[in-house]
Amino acid sequence: MAGRRKVVALAGVLAAIVLAGPAGIGEAKERTPRATHVPATPENLTYGALPRDASPVATVKSGGVAVVDTIGAVGGTSTVSPEQYFGAFGVRPDEILKDVKDFWASLPGRTRSGPHPLTGPIYVEGAEPGDVLQVDIIGLRTRVPYGVNLTAPFSGVLAPTYPGFRPGDLGLDIPEPPADAIAGLFPNVRQHLIRTGLNRKGEEVAFFSKDVEVPLRKHLGVMGVAPADNMWVGSTPDAEPPADRMQGSGPPGPFGGNMDISHLGEGWTLYLPVFRKGAQFFAGDGHGAEGDGEVSGTAIEQSLTGTLRFTVRKDMELDLPRLENPRAWVVMGIDHDLDRAMRIAVLEAVEFLVEEKGMTPAKAYSLASVAVDFHSAEVVDGTQVVIGTIRKSLFKK
């Protein structure tokens, strides 16, 4: 916390945004006028990294809109082809995106730094270190009517590498894949393909089972910018950076990245500190739905298309990402230690109330305790994310 944020009015930034309409199934059909389309072709994808100063796959002006295609983090990175992987769940070949097939075919020539195929970097004209990149999430659409969730006896928060694990802790009674399983596939036990679509009420849901429908909360788990030269975040506090200091896509940090916050959906605005010329924005890890925490280690991993507006803010300074919609501001704390992440989130909330609402630190801390809602948004990516929601309805002006 540097305590250097300028006092700016953040309210109302979404008032002029025209949303892309109700969410539908399949690829986005409408295109915002003059939007830049960024397809998820192999040349536009990095594998598990937010590289610094990579050549832009697209460039937009401040205030410009991009329609960004992404591919899911599961099914296109397996040791078997997407046709074999998804075919094990009954998915037809014509239901599999060409982007996913092409990315899988490109894997032998790639270096993998993390788990996510990411679209980018998108350069934003005029963005300089010290600025803030405002990303308005105008719309999100599913590209395919299914996604995958993974489970294992010791995955997610149950993993031996998770900070809460203690010697002797037991995992879940989830069977091992059969000895003849291809690529470890054990459908409906280790891997769960979940269909999505419209239910009889016209609501977009995930058909978890014949008795359970989960409302979709589409969001991009990874939204971030290229980090500074001296910035590197590992999956554990003592992890050494690789020789090339490539920032992997697993743990989130001040640059954003794999925040996995379900709020990052349609109608929200994300603010990211800028560390490099052009900001160099990346997106991926699409989710159809996710419970806060993402406790098994995955959500409904699904290919999405995002319609995003990028605006360079030279009237703001931030140390960590922040969110906003017409109803609330959301601050966050990110750290390997969950308690530390909570502390950082509280300090961020206090700082916001002091600098944006003119409160004394004492009054801001008091309001944070009686009216700001803090909870774990994501706990399985090495660094953990705690968010604090400040409702705008608390304030008369």
Image: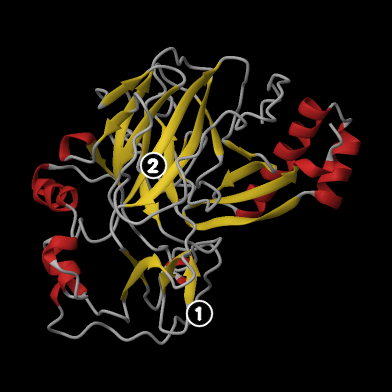
**For the residues carrying marks 1 and 2, which lies nearer the camera in this image?**
2
Q: In this view, does 156 lie to the left or right of 146?
A: right
Image: 95 above or below 251:
below
Quadrant in which the C terminus appears: top right
Mark 2 packing: few (<14 Cα in 10 Å), some, or many (20+)? many
Q: Residue at x 61, y 55 (%)?
A: 338
Q: Nearer the viewer, residue 87 or 387?
A: 87
The residue singled out by tag 1 in the image is: 169
Residue 231 visible in the current orientation: no
Q: Which residue is drawn at 56% across and 41% down?
A: 268
Q: Position of residue 219 (x, y in %)?
A: 45, 50
Q: Quadrant of the rendered structure where residue 62 is?
A: top left
Image: 193 above or below 8:
below
Mark 1 packing: few (<14 Cα in 10 Å), some, or many (20+)? few
Q: Position of residue 53 (x, y in %)?
A: 31, 22
Three-letter amino acid code of the residue under disc 2:
Gly
Q: Where is residue 11 in the image (x, y as percent from the top left)?
A: 70, 30
Contact, CB < 8 Å: mark 1 with mark 2?
A: no
Q: Quadrant of the rendered structure where residue 313 is?
A: top right
* Disc 2 element: strand
Quadrant in which the N terminus appears: top right
Residue 89 visible in the current orientation: yes
The residue singled out by tag 2 in the image is: 306
- The span from disc 1 to disc 2 (Cα, nearest Å) is 40 Å
Q: Nearer the viewer, residue 26 or 324?
A: 26
* Residue at far front of view: 201
